[in-house]
Amino acid sequence: MKKKIITISVLAIFSILFWLSIALNNEYLSSINARLVIKDPPKNYSISVELPDEILISVKGTGWNLLKYTLFEKAEFEISIHKKVGKKKIDLKDFVNSNNWLSSNFKVIDINPNSFDIDFERSISKTVRVYSKLKLDFENDYDIVSDIEIEPQFIEVVGAPSLLKRIDSVFTIQKEFNNIKENFFENIPLQLIKGTEFSDEYCTIKFNVQKIVDKNFENIPVNVINAPNDQEIILYPSKVNILLKGGINILGKLTNDSIKAFVDFDKLNRDDNYVIPQVVLPKFIKLISIEPNNLEFVIKKN
């Protein structure tokens, strides 16, 4: 019984394949999306008008060829300018025969768009800044603990003056990275701008990542700044405990001398008898709390 089922299944598969083979030998009407490629532009000139990225070609051809160019191979429709400068009207049907993949396999019914105007301007270059469009998501209790470095920070963009005047910066592609918990180093493609050339098409993005922890620093002295020579400020207490949050390696290297707490004489409110100390911290360190938060003060003349 089992052998009989296998035999029937094999026959069914061969029947389907035989039917498909016959069907794909027949001719059909269909449409192919083809990438538009401009060949042989004039040297030191750039296209100054916006052209379509793709064209839609209505064709008649065998199922085999339609299957190839609709599912397995991206078609390109090439237009040769022959290095000629100046505004001109391009009729796409004039270039069907020079695209051998198209003329030898299909009968062309229609092309959309069927024509467009093209013009060139002498190329110029412009230096612009590179910006990241990455979306970063970190593992729980991990975060960035350094500046984000982009290399190169600037690139040269070459193109028509009318186009470059609208370009002040370039960006990476949009890409998402999740559950980051180690130092980050990635080569990221830039978003290319149609009608231009970039001196670099990739940039390197890097930054440091550490586990984020809390650490308490006790008996940090509070200094007074901007006090006049003839007056003295007495603080009570004169030392505070400070709770910080930051990267585990960064906090591990900090000492009491790394943290500066102070009050500014010029900002004292004489109507109050207390002041809130300020704290100077290294980069990428956050202040959680100061204990005590309010310090009593007395001003004495020397």
Image (spheres, grey):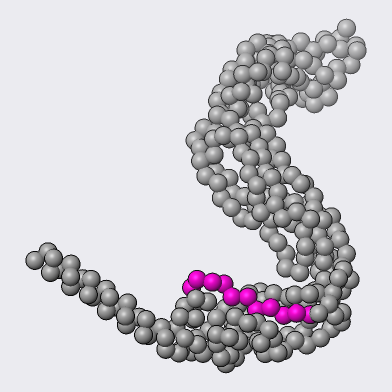
Above-or-below relation of 246 to 173: above
- Residue 36 visible somewhere in the drawing: yes
Residue extending farthest top: 302
Q: How far across and down, in percent of the image, does residue 277 sit?
A: 71, 21
Above-or-below relation of 300 to 9: above
Q: Residue at x 60, y 27 (%)?
A: 247
Q: Residue at x 82, y 62 (%)?
A: 158
Q: Residue at x 76, y 69 (%)?
A: 195
Label tally: 0
In the picture, measured across the screen, residue 241 lies left or right of residue 1, that is right
- Where residue 81 sits, quadrant-wise, is bottom right
Q: How far across and down, in percent of the image, does residue 121 sit?
A: 87, 74
In the picture, measured across the screen, residue 75 lies left or right of residue 95, that is left
Residue extending farthest right: 229
Residue 68 within the magenta-colored segment of the rendering: no
- Residue 292 visible somewhere in the drawing: no
In the picture, measured across the screen, residue 142 lies left or right of residue 222, that is left
Residue 74 within the magenta-colored segment of the rendering: yes
Screen quadrant of the N terminus: bottom left
